[in-house]
Amino acid sequence: MKPNAGYTLTELVVVIVVLGLVAAAVTPQIIGRFRRSKSQSAMLQMQTIGAAVDMFYVDMGRYPTEAEGINALWVAPTADVGGNAWTGPYVREQSTLSDPWNVEFIYIPPDSVLSSYQLKTLGVDKADGGTADATDLVFPITGPSTTGG
């Protein structure tokens, strides 16, 4: 065995540079996948909340009002005159009602323009409109004009 066995400073610098290049190449791809996964998660959550809204409709004979919002899936609204029974909560946890960016989903009840309710999240930028990762997500998907923006 050589008495001076080990790595030279040059070898260590080369290894560090190579690791830095690999990290620089891989990091943007990982961040992009992470952002896309949050958008996909938001759509899955909206589908789950949509099913809960439908169960609310079956029990109550109506959709939650704008004043009640999606919190009516977690907390019983005031008693209906029609005697319909709220059998909720319709979601397992109240946190289900918030998107992956910790903002409560926007609930838009049906009216003379909308024949059905809509759920919406403003995405990562938390502002109306947006493109790419900041695109607003709407459920149910009804066409390009409902995506905000």
Image (cartoon, rainbow, N blue to C red):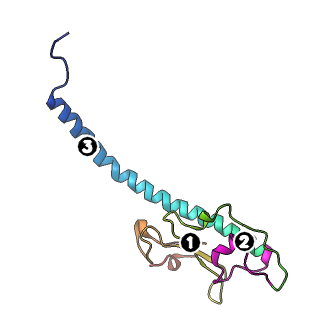
- Which region of the structure is painted magenta? 59-80
Say which residue appears at 65% left-offset and 62% top-offset.
93
Say which residue appears at 56% left-offset and 67% top-offset.
98
- Quadrant for the N terminus in the image: top left
Disc marking residue 20:
3
Magenta-colored segment: predominant secondary structure: loop
Based on the displayed image, in which of its 4 quarters is residue 50 positioned? bottom right
Mark nearer the N terminus (1 vs 3): 3
Q: Is residue 31 left or right of residue 113?
A: left
Q: What separation in Å lies between label 1 and label 3 (alpha carbons)?
A: 39 Å
Say which residue appears at 60% left-offset and 67% top-offset.
97
Q: Is residue 75 left or right of residue 101?
A: right
- Residue 112, image x, y percentages: 65, 90
Disc marking residue 105:
1
Q: Is residue 37 above or below residue 59?
A: above
Say which residue appears at 30% left-offset and 45% top-offset.
23
Based on the displayed image, in which of its 4 quarters is residue 70 positioned? bottom right
- Residue 123, image x, y percentages: 47, 69
SS state under label 2? helix
Residue type of the residue flagged with mark 1: Phe
Query: In the image as oriented, which residue stretches furthest toward the right?
Result: 83
Graded by Cα atoms within 10 Å as few (under 14), some (14 to 19) or many (20 or more), the crowding at tag 2 reads some
Residue 68 located within the stretch drawn in magenta: yes
Graded by Cα atoms within 10 Å as few (under 14), some (14 to 19) or many (20 or more), the crowding at tag 3 reads few
SS state under label 3? helix
Of residues 148 and 126, which is closer to you in this image? 126
Query: In the image as oriented, which residue stretches furthest toward the bottom?
Result: 112
Disc marking residue 54:
2
